[in-house]
Image: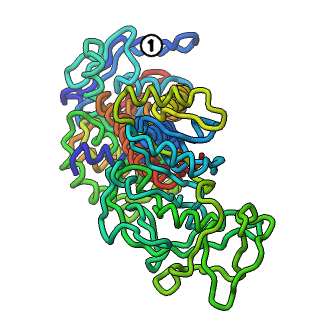
Amino acid sequence: MTQSAAILRLAWAYLASHRKQSTAILIAISLAVSLPIVTSNIVDQYLQTLDTRSGNPPLMLSPQGSRFDTVLKVQYFLGESLPPLQWKDAANISANKSLRCVPVHALHTANDRATPVIGTGTDYFTVRNLNLQSGQMFTHAGECVIGALVNIEKGVIQTDISNPFDLSAPASLSLTVAGRLHPSGTPDDRAIFVSLDTAWILDGYGHGHDAADQGTAAANSSVLGDATDGHQPNNAIRTIDKTNRHKIHFHGNRNLYPISAVLIWPNTLRDQIVLEGKYIDHKSLQILRPDVEIKSIMRYVFQMNAVLQRIFLILGTGTSLLIAVIIFQAINARKCDLNTMRLLGCSHLQVLKLLGTELFLLLVGSALLTIVLTTTLIATLPSLESLI
Amino acid sequence: MQNKTPVISVDHLIFRYPDSNFKLDIPKFEVASGAQCVITGPSGCGKTTLLRLLSGIESIQTGEITIKNQKLSKLPHLAIRNLRNLNFGFVFQDFRLVDYLSLRDNILLGVTLGSAIDRAPAIARLDKLSDRVGIAHLLDRPVSKLSRGEMQRVAVCRALIHNPAIIFADEPTANLDRKNSAIIWDLINSEARNNAATVVAVSHDPDSIDRFEQVIELDSLIETVAS
């Protein structure tokens, strides 16, 4: 055994015989290092998610209300459902030839509210540059296209009931997966896309009856309660396929059907300014600039992160001092052993090498623990988006 | 023995501890190379202090100590450390073993952390030496789990492992029964003879004193030579 190996052995013997002290130092160092890394990583991921589409589209039409919540919901599919606007508003703005408009219906979820169900047109995939990885685009009511990260079981997606406490709420649907999108690194990877008709069926504006069931008069709490010819089926069709597709029908005035917002790409800057001016004093609608809203929230997140990092810096400094005290105390407690080494004529350099090796082993152990801890925390902690 | 070259010589050595009335005043004495010498005297007369001065652990204040023709007062600290590490073997009164290390690591401690000792011969000697003192089967056990007698043997092994030229032993058999005491002295004396090493021991056990050819009665500094 070489001298270095023998010193390593002595250092290991010391650390192993002082397990509690060594473990405390390992954990303290690892926490002091990994917590800022994990926090920074979570915040960075969140900022990255926000940044993916902050300026795309440049404008958005939505009902009057929280601008940021609207952007968060429509652009990132995060947060609670917001009051919708009516289809006629979307149709009005879409008639403007100097704008490219894509309606978005973000009022439903699937997989126990884990996955947003987005109703939109096929234009959405063009403007978002989303391509199919497998299968085909939805062509019929009851079909969906899923994002790259959406989990499915047996080729079917079960939507959630919008309000489980409303007995007359529309039943959930089993959506047939028509295709899967390529990964895009955007919130679209986690979403399920359906046609607006399917979204309105989920709202309860459209449905189909079993042959034996011709439906009843509209219940008070049903969305069809507002429809003049409203009625609702006793046993609504839960899976739409070619055998029952012809039975699906809609009620009420389509112009009043809900959507969440309209994504707008003006052809020119002038078109954008004109549009913004047109809606500046609108009573029920607003034109948003997603990038402005996102930048304001990113500024808050940056500030929050900066404050957190400062706190971690203070904690890290405190931990370092604490570790220094522990090491100093440990050396103090070993005065007798170190004196024995002096009496035996041990070289100063070799004794320092021994103490250095102990510290080195602690640092290597801490580094390994930090890697494990950081990786585990990043993998297991929920993302900031999911907490919103 | 008187004709042999002195390996240790003390000349007009005076030593005081600060803030203490204690004073060690030794006009002159010599220990010949290969001699087996014991320092005796009543408690508190300075036996251990003299041993510490001879081994360079305490610095000389007045007078001179010459070890292997090197005047300790002229040697820098580093050289004295190296001299201690290479040429001296120590058996301390309180053993001074490192309790978290195994017997093996304790015995090799001075060799492992020394700057100039060749480890290979020491490692090769370890099995034979530990076998002779009856601790070969305990080499990987932590020192903290040993009996006092076993610790004493480990301390002796550590002092002998690098074949030192001079062995300093400070009451190495204190608290041992007569039989075990004899084993330890036999071991020290025979190892010293085999390697032509000089032994300077401190003891006030009459049975032990009889084993030494040179007895230094520190209290009166009357040097007697045993037959």
Residue A377, horizontal then vertical, whole percent: 49, 50
- The total of numbered circles placed on residues is 1
Q: Quadrant of residue A363?
A: top left
Look at the picture and state if B57 lies above or below A192. above
Residue found at the very far top of the displayed protein? B62
Q: Is residue A176 left or right of residue A229?
A: left
Q: Is residue A127 visible?
A: yes
The residue tagged with tag 1: helix, strand or loop?
strand
Furthest residue to the bottom?
Answer: A212
Q: Hey, which residue is sitting farthest right in the picture?
A: A220
Residue designated by label 1: B15
Res B138 quadrant in image: bottom left
Q: Position of residue A14 (x, y in %)?
A: 44, 45
A39 relative position to B65: left or right: right
In the foreground, A229 or B137: A229
Q: Nearer the viewer, residue A53 or B207?
A: A53
Task: State which quadrant residue A370 falls in.
Answer: top left
Q: Quadrant location of the C terminus of chain B? A: top left
**Residue B61 at x, y percent in the picture:** 39, 10
- Amino acid identity at mark 1: Phe
Q: Residue visible at 37% across and 14% down?
A: B60
Kindly identify the residue that appears in the image at 43 percent across and 45 percent down: A101
- Residue in front for this viewpoint, B178 or A135: A135
Residue shown at 39% from the left, 31% from the top: A343
Tell me: residue B127, above or below residue B190. Answer: below
Q: Which image quarter holds the N terminus of chain B?
A: top left
Residue shown at 57% from the left, 36% from the top: A68
Residue B93 lies, with reference to residue A6, above or below; the image says: above
How many neighbours does mark 1 have within 10 angstroms: few (below 14), some (14-19), or many (20 or more)? Answer: many
Closer to us: A318 or A274? A274
